[in-house]
Amino acid sequence: MKSGIIPMDLHFKFRKSALKHNVTEADIRHAFETCCFVGRYQNRTNVFLLLGFDMNANPVEILYNKFGGNGVNVFHAMPCQKKFYHLFEEGENL
């Protein structure tokens, strides 16, 4: 990941919906640390898709909103769907 893309001093909020696919808070934090892709999701305002890896090196997809200076409101996290795999290689929007 390029330096400065994701600040390391993030303030996380986790919605219940973010944890319903058995991706833990620790997995989500790790995905931010191992980020391979981040970009606006479906051109929506303040909705971002992040692709990274969980604590077991499995690819995960995260949807979140930004708030405040370094706040992220995570509302979706799950094992990465195959439709996003190409973004790991392309590294778009980093």
Image (cartoon, grey):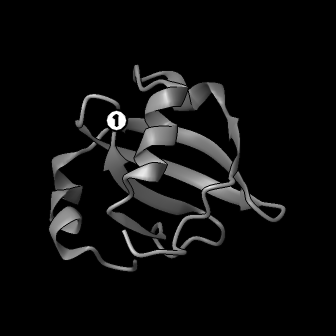
Q: Nearer the viewer, residue 83 or 19?
A: 19
Residue drawn at (23%, 45%) of the image: 81
- Check the image and report above or below for 66 versus 82: below
Q: Residue furthest bottom?
A: 93
Q: Secondary structure at mark 1?
A: loop
Of residues 92 and 36, the one drawn nearer to the viewer in this rendering = 36
Name the residue located 37 percent from the left edge and 35 percent from the top edge: 78
Q: Look at label 1 and name its amino acid.
A: Asp
Q: Quadrant of residue 87?
A: bottom left
- Residue 33 position (above or below residue 27): below
Q: How many marks?
A: 1
Residue where numbered disc 1 is placed: 54
Relative image position of residue 8 (x, y in whole percent):
60, 56
Q: Is residue 2 left or right of residue 68?
A: left
Circle 1 crowding by C-alpha within 10 Å: few under 14, some 14–19, many from 20:
many
Q: State the image coordinates of residue 90 (x, y, percent, origin top left).
A: 19, 75
Could you tell me which residue is drawn at 27 percent across and 73 percent down?
91
Give the residue drawn at x 51%, y 76%.
43
Above or below, comparing residue 44 to residue 85 in the picture: below
Quarter of the picture holding the N terminus: bottom left
**Quarter placement of the C terminus:** bottom left
User: Quick check: 11 left or right of 75?
Assistant: right
Image quarter of residue 77: top left
Q: Position of residue 41 (x, y in %)?
A: 47, 66
Q: Position of residue 52 (x, y in %)?
A: 34, 50
